[in-house]
Each structure stands twice: as structure tokens, then as C-alpha cells.
Image (tube, helix red, strand yellow):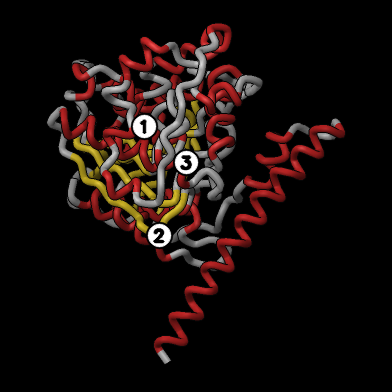
């Protein structure tokens, strides 16, 4: 009987995963069709189908929409009596800097606040391509600083504030954490929590990009598309970026100590990695994307002097995710600089699975485990 139940459960999950893949591809194709017909842009359509909705009143949380330094935020506060000041998590949502909203991540933020007993501040930063880099980063930084200076209004311990984000939100959390590392006029961040973060745009051919290039919910091409939309709102050089011809040879050598397959543990190469021929550098492409070398956009490129000042870190990676190796490379950088790192790897996880922990009444066990690993880390802070 147990074999039958497990078989049914496995087949059901696989079937649901295929449905998600079909849905993702269909949505993308329909968006392109609508854009060509002039009805709406592909991005506008994508935002429409991905928009979340406000949930019913949560009896365990007090939730309010505010503005921190003109940045829209949603604050989640547990109603349960606290015997002391609470910890706080400032959350930056994912969505490739292009999609995502406060409503999209309502379930996730409610869960984290309820289960960890923490105040959660969800930040609605400006989206690309309408608002290019560094708009999203600046919004996240400004909202964080505002909250750190006003913790007394929320019963929060200023020494227990952490930043957290998934995917593009993980990128923003890492960038904000680096910026605040040297600030003496603000409390030091307690931790940074990076959930399958995207941390570099130099190499889209790392082992995880090769192995998972066609795995939803983030295809290799789409990862480059999102990065270019965030950078300058123009993805016309996507092919050159994918091939690696957008980075000068001397700069590639400079960053090779941090961005290289050599720094990826061998067990993550077991599914196969092809050595790729170097591509010819295209100077005119580099001129349009040279800000990819700025740490506020690609935190993996920060100097050691910054990295060694970073707070205790939590990094979650998924095996079937093009961004897996970004997380692994940053984990190594942090550890090499003496930063304490808690790493949680979902062997059966794929990109975006945290948001699907309770998706349409169907729960992905891997997503639930990943979210609980974040909660458990927070409880230890």
C-alpha cells in the first residue's frame, strides 16, 4: 500500500510540474503574440497573469500598507503578546526585477511572520524596464534605512534586523547588505537571507546554466533577458551576453577567481558540463552593459574588504535551477572571508519553488521544506 501511495504521490507531483511548465511556456508565447499584435507588451501581460490577490484577514497578524521614504511597503506584525522586542525581516520579492508585487508574495510573507514570530516588511520596489537599475536597489536601500531608523514604532530590536529576498530579491538583499556593511550611523544587520539569488551576469554558462537551461520556472535565456531589462530596459544584445562576448578578456581574468566553474564542487558537475570555447569580445556590446561589473548590480563581484564585513548569512539553493551556482559561488566567497554561512540545498528543488509551497491548494513538499528552513534559521537569530 505504501508503494502505491508513494508512486501516486510522485506521479502527481511530476504531473503538476509538467502543468506548471506548460503554463509558463504558454504564458510566454501568448505574451509575445499580444505584443506583436500591439494589444499590450509581453511584460504587461506577464504581470497581469502573475498578479496575486489580497487574502482574507489573518487572525494572527496585523497587516498594514505604508510608505517608507516614498517606497510602498506592507508590514506584517504578529498579534501574539511578545515578552520582548521582536526580530524583523525586510523582504524583497523576486520576479526578475520585472514582475512581482506585495500581493504576489502575500502568502510567503504571512507564513514567515506567523511561523517565526517576526515583524516582516515587504518592499514594493520600482520594476524594470520602466525603472532601470539602480531604481530597485535604491528603493530597497531607502526602505531599509527608513525602517532601521524607526524600529521603535514596531516593537523591533534594532540589533535583530535581517534582509531577505528570493531570486532578484536575493540579489537586492545582497546588494543592500553590502552597502550597509560599512555604515557606522546605523545598526549592523543581523543576517542576510538569500533564496536562490541571482548574483552575477558575467557568465551564463556555469554548470548550473548548462544543466538546467530548459528547466522552468527560469530558463537560461530568460535569466539573461531579465538582467538586461533591469540594467537598461533593452534585451537586444541577449545572444552576445549568453555567449559571454560582453566582457573584456582582462576583466574576465580579473573576476575568474570569483566567477569560475573551478570554484563549484565536483558533485554539482556530475550531470555533465561542456567546456566552452572562448567567444570573441564585442566592445560595442560591453559599452552598453559595462555596469554589470558594479557590485550593486552583481554582488558576487564585491571586493573582499566589503565581503568580510557582511553579517551572518543563509543561502538556499536548488539543484534544478540555473542560479544554483551563483549561490554556491557566493557561499564560497563568504566562507573564504570568515562570514558564517548556513546553507540549505533542495536536491529536488527548482527555481521559484518557495512561492509554490501552497500553490492553488497543491503543496510542493520541497517548497515547504525550503520555507521552513528559512523560518528555522530566523528562530535561531
288 or 255: nearer the viewer:
255
Q: Are marks 3 and 2 in contact (CB under 8 Å)?
A: no
- If you read the primary sequence from the N terminus, does the residue marked by circle 1 or circle 3 appear first? 1
- Please say if the residues under marks 1 and 2 sit with CB atoms less than 8 Å apart: no
Left or right? Give the position of 37 relative to 143: right
Residue hosting label 1: 173
Q: Secondary structure at mark 3?
A: helix
Nearer the viewer's eye, disc 1 or disc 3? 3
Q: Residues within 10 Å of mark 3 (few under 14, many from 20)?
A: some
User: Is 293 rendered above or below residue 158?
Assistant: above
- Disc 1 to disc 3, how far (Cα)? 26 Å
The residues bearing labels 3 and 2 have C-alpha atoms spaced at a distance of 17 Å
Task: Please give the name of the residue rendered at 36% of the width and 19% of the height, measured from the top-left corner.
Answer: 295
Residue at 19% in and 16% down: 305
Horizontal side of residue 366 vs 289, given as left or right: left
Q: Position of residue 334 (x, y in %)?
A: 21, 32
The secondary element bearing badge 1 is classed as helix
Please state the horizontal and vertical placement of residue 57, each as a whole percent of the image.
Answer: 51, 57
User: What residue does disc 3 label?
Assistant: 210
Q: Is residue 166 visible?
A: no
Left-right relation of 187 to 95:
left
Q: Quadrant of the N terminus?
A: bottom left
Q: Quadrant of residue 381?
A: top left
Which label number is shown at residue 348? 2
**Where on the picture, by quarter, is residue 221?**
top right
Residue found 34% across the figure and 46% down from its top = 269
Dot 2: few (<14), some (14–19), or many (≥20) neighbours within 10 Å? few
Q: How many marks?
A: 3
Q: Nearest the camera: 309 or 328?
A: 328
Residue nearest the observer in this picture, 168 or 261 = 261
Disc 2 is placed on an element classified as: strand
When the figure is inspected, residue 28 is found, relative to residue 223, above or below; the finding is below
Amino acid at each position: 500500500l505504501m508503494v502505491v501511495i508513494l508512486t501516486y504521490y510522485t506521479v502527481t507531483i511530476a504531473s503538476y510540474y509538467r502543468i506548471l511548465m506548460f503554463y509558463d511556456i504558454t504564458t510566454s508565447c501568448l505574451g509575445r503574440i499580444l505584443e506583436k499584435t500591439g494589444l499590450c507588451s509581453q511584460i504587461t501581460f506577464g504581470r497581469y497573469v502573475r498578479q496575486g490577490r489580497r487574502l482574507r484577514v489573518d487572525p494572527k497578524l496585523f497587516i498594514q500598507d505604508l510608505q517608507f521614504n516614498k517606497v510602498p511597503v506592507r508590514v506584517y506584525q504578529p498579534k501574539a503578546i511578545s515578552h520582548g522586542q521582536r526580530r524583523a525581516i525586510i523582504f524583497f520579492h523576486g520576479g526578475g526585477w520585472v514582475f512581482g508585487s506585495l500581493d504576489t508574495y502575500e502568502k510567503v510573507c504571512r507564513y514567515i511572520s506567523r511561523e517565526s514570530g517576526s515583524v516582516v516588511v515587504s518592499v514594493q520596489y520600482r520594476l524594470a524596464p520602466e525603472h532601470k537599475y539602480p531604481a530597485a536597489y535604491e528603493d530597497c536601500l531607502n526602505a531599509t534605512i527608513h525602517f532601521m531608523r524607526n524600529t521603535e514604532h514596531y516593537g523591533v530590536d534594532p540589533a535583530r534586523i535581517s534582509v531577505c529576498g528570493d531570486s532578484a530579491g536575493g540579489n537586492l538583499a545582497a546588494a543592500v547588505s553590502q552597502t550597509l556593511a560599512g555604515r557606522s550611523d546605523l545598526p549592523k544587520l543581523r543576517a542576510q537571507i538569500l533564496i536562490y539569488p541571482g548574483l552575477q551576469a558575467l557568465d551564463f554558462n556555469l554548470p548550473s546554466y548548462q544543466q538546467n537551461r530548459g528547466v522552468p520556472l527560469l530558463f537560461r535565456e530568460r535569466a539573461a533577458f531579465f538582467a538586461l531589462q533591469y540594467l537598461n530596459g533593452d534585451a537586444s544584445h541577449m545572444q552576445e551576453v549568453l555567449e559571454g562576448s560582453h566582457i573584456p578578456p582582462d576583466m574576465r581574468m580579473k573576476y575568474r577567481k570569483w566567477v569560475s566553474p573551478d570554484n563549484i564542487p565536483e558533485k554539482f558537475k556530475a550531470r555533465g558540463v561542456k567546456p566552452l570555447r572562448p567567444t570573441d569580445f564585442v566592445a560595442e556590446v560591453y559599452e552598453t552593459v559595462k555596469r554589470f561589473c558594479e557590485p550593486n548590480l552583481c554582488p558576487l563581484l564585491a571586493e573582499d574588504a566589503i565581503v568580510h564585513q557582511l553579517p551572518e548569512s543563509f543561502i538556499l539553493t536548488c539543484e534544478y535551477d540555473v542560479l544554483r551556482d551563483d549561490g554556491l559561488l557566493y557561499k564560497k566567497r563568504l566562507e573564504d572571508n570568515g562570514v558564517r554561512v548556513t546553507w540549505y540545498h533542495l536536491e529536488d528543488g527548482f527555481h521559484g519553488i518557495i512561492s509554490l509551497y501552497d500553490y492553488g491548494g497543491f503543496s510542493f513538499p520541497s517548497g515547504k521544506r525550503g520555507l521552513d528552513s528559512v523560518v528555522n534559521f530566523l528562530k535561531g537569530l
